[in-house]
Image: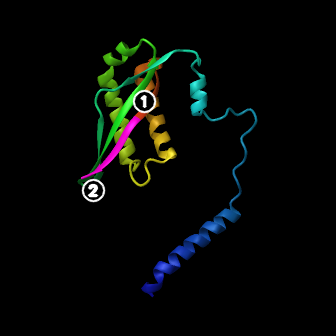
Amino acid sequence: MLKFLPIVLPVLGLGAGVGAGIFVPPPAPLPADCPAPESEAALDASTPPDTPVEYMKLNNQFVVPLVDGNDVTSMVIVSLSLEIAQGRQEDIYNIEPKLRDAFLRVLFDHASLGGFEGNFLSHLGLDTLRLALREMGQSTAGPVLRDVLIVDLVKQAI
C-alpha cells in the first residue's frame, strides 16, 4: 500500500487544484473609482523628471548569512548604490550608520523569508528586495533618497 502513496498523492493534489480552478469564481473587478495600486512608475512620478540626481556608492558591502537550522550554509554579499538629490551626499554620509542598519534589517528579513533561496535573481525576487530597500531607505533618509540600486549580489556557499 505504501508503494502507491507517491503516485496517489500527486494525482489527488492535481485533481483538487483542477476542481478548485473550475468551481471557485474569479475575483470581482475593482470599481472604476478605486485608485490603482502604487507601482514603481507611480513612485517615480512623484518626483519631477527634471530634478537632477547623483549616485553614491555605499563604501562597504553588506554580508548576510544564510542559516539552515543552527548552521550557516552560505553568505550573500550585496553592494548598494543610492540615487540621491544632487548636492546632498553630505546629508547621506551623516546618517550612513542609520541607513546601513535599516538596510541590514531588510536584507536579514529577506534572507529569513527564503528570498535568497532558489532562483533569487529573478525579476520578481530582485524587485521585491529593491522595493523593500527603497521604502526603508526613504523612511530613514527622507526625500533626499530617491532610489536604492543593487549593484552587486553574490551568494557564496560555505
Is the residue 9 above or below the residue 132 in the image?
Answer: below
Residue at 39% x, 43% y: name it: 110
- The residue carrying mark 1 is 136
Q: Main secondary structure of the magenta part?
A: strand
Compare marks 1 and 2 and give the one earlier in the sequence.
Answer: 2
Labels 1 & 2 near each other (Cβ < 8 A)? no
Residue at 72% x, 48% y: name it: 28
Q: What's the coloring here?
A: rainbow
State which quadrant residue 84 falls in: top left
Q: Which region of the structure is painted magenta?
A: 151-158
Q: What kind of residue is marked 2?
A: Gly
State which quadrant residue 118 falls in: bottom left
Q: Report the residue that reaches farthest toward the right.
A: 32
Pick the residue in front: 68 or 152: 152
Percent x, y for residue 16? 60, 69
Is the residue 10 above or below the residue 73 in the image?
Answer: below
- The residue carrying mark 2 is 69
Report helix, strand or loop for mark 2.
loop
Q: How many marks?
A: 2
Q: What kind of residue is marked 1?
A: Met
